[in-house]
Amino acid sequence: MELINKVTRIRHLFVGAFSFFFLLLIISCSEEPLKVGIHLLPEDELLQVYDTVLPVELYTISAKALKVYSLSSSPLGSVYDPVMGALKTDYLADIFYSAYVSFLDTIVEENIDVYNLELLLYYDVIYGDSLAIDFNVYELIEPIPEGKNSDFIVTPEMINPTPLNLGAPERLNDSTRAFKVMLSLDYAKKFIDPQLIEDSVYTANPLLFKEYFKGFYFATDFRSTEGGGIMRVNNSTSKMILRTLEWNSNSMQFDTINNEFSIGNPAIMLDSSDVVNLSMFQSIPGDDVAAILDDTLNSQSIVYIQSLAGPNVLIDFPTLENFGKKFGDNIVINKAELILPVNQELYDDITFVPPRNLGLYDHVSKSFLADDGLLSYYFGGVLDTVNYQYKFNVGNHIHEYLHSDSDTLFSKKYILFPSKATTPVYYLETLPRRIVLNGRNSAEKPSLKIMYSLMPE
């Protein structure tokens, strides 16, 4: 035991002595930590690191009216922002019966009647004022179109022009987080038409049901006064309840039966090409936005960006090409930061909330710029609320551009857009978040900060 204790004391003395001499070595070193060991290589084999700041041009460009198929949630409502202008979101949704329909294959007309027809639109979040959300419900008389034309609009020929809703939508004040809409009884009676049931509309091919019931069009109007609200409807849980009065021969009275139908549920797709809902976004730019919209010739002091159908921003690096030509193939980009300052005078995080993330889209290759893969979320694009800026690490992309020719898939023009999540996967932002950024003519300008080295010839 005494031998073991002596060995332990010797070990502790050795560790203490070694730590003391190592610390003394570090303290006595006169060179900067990053330069320690630099003389191990000949001076002519060392690569120098240089830095420069290049100008960045930002232009406000229009985004066309957009439509998106079969989302798990559909925005519905309208807002008016005195800075951005007006924006509204509508959607079309399929109807499909569930297993809780009591009259699937038989009906005796005098033994059943309609009590009411209730539509419940569940939502997960509201942007703006929930009391300002208003919409009408129309019956579709043509199926939801499957084409990919982004200029699509609902025409009068597609709908029954008389709204189905009996009064304004009612927001439920309990924990259900839903809007309730009572629908027309005349429309409700179509679902218990004895002839349709005799024709096996509920039990044959589900496509037969869709031939009779094309779906709903949820429509809003553009606002002209500040405010408004948009809710994000959950298509997986929203439903329609047809309450019928059905004769009970045992109790000799009518029972009230709840018959449920799903509304726009993407989980109920008859095949891979089926369309169960279609979201549409439209905007009318405000005067300040309209004055500079799509002007890509003149530098701008501020630029505007808004998700859904609002404006996007075109980014250009006017001197990047000449910068690369000056060094040719010898240049190596070590790091490149694209810094986009937020205009703090027009910043609003209460009423018109900014997008947490922005994404970049290559103007030439028509592809999203992805994470550089060094670290999780290294690419950036997240709103910095301390420095009021968005910052992207685009070193790999700038390097590829400088070492490519005109036939490759890299460009120096990116489209900036709101994204619901950071790279490597982009998701459509389904709320009308907006931000105003400083342009090249502002005091705090956007910039591209580059650190580079030159390879020996």
Image (cartoon, rainbow, N blue to C red):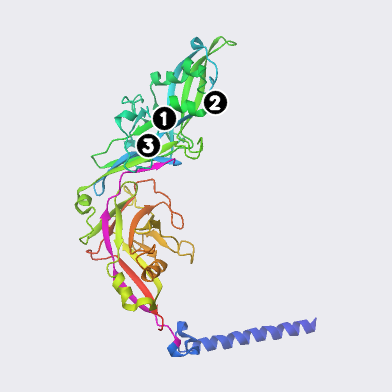
Whether residue 289 sits left or right of residue 95 in the image: it is: left
Q: Residue 412, position in %: x, y?
A: 33, 64
- Quarter in which the N terminus is drawn: bottom right
The residue at the point 42 percent across, 83 percent down is 47
Of callouts 3 and 2, the N-terminal one: 3
Q: What element carries label 3?
A: strand
Q: What residue is disc 3 on?
A: 91
Residue range corresponding to the magenta coloring: 45-70
Viewer-side residue, 248 vs 152 = 152
- Nearer mark to the viewer, of 3 and 2: 3
Mark 3 and mark 2 residues within 8 Å of each other at the beta carbon:
no
**Crowding at label 3, few (<14), some or many (≥20) Cα neighbours within 10 Å?**
many
Instruction: Characterize the local packing of mark 1: few (<14), some (14-19) or many (20 or more) Cα atoms within 10 angstroms.
Output: many
Residue that appears at 22% across and 47% down: 286
Label 3 and label 2: CA atoms lie apart by 26 Å
**What amino acid type should be assigned to the residue bearing mark 1?**
Gly
Q: Which of marks 1 and 3 is nearer the N terminus?
A: 3
- Residue 338 in picture, x, y percent from top left: 35, 65
Residue marked by disc 2:
100
Q: Name the residue under label 1.
A: 215
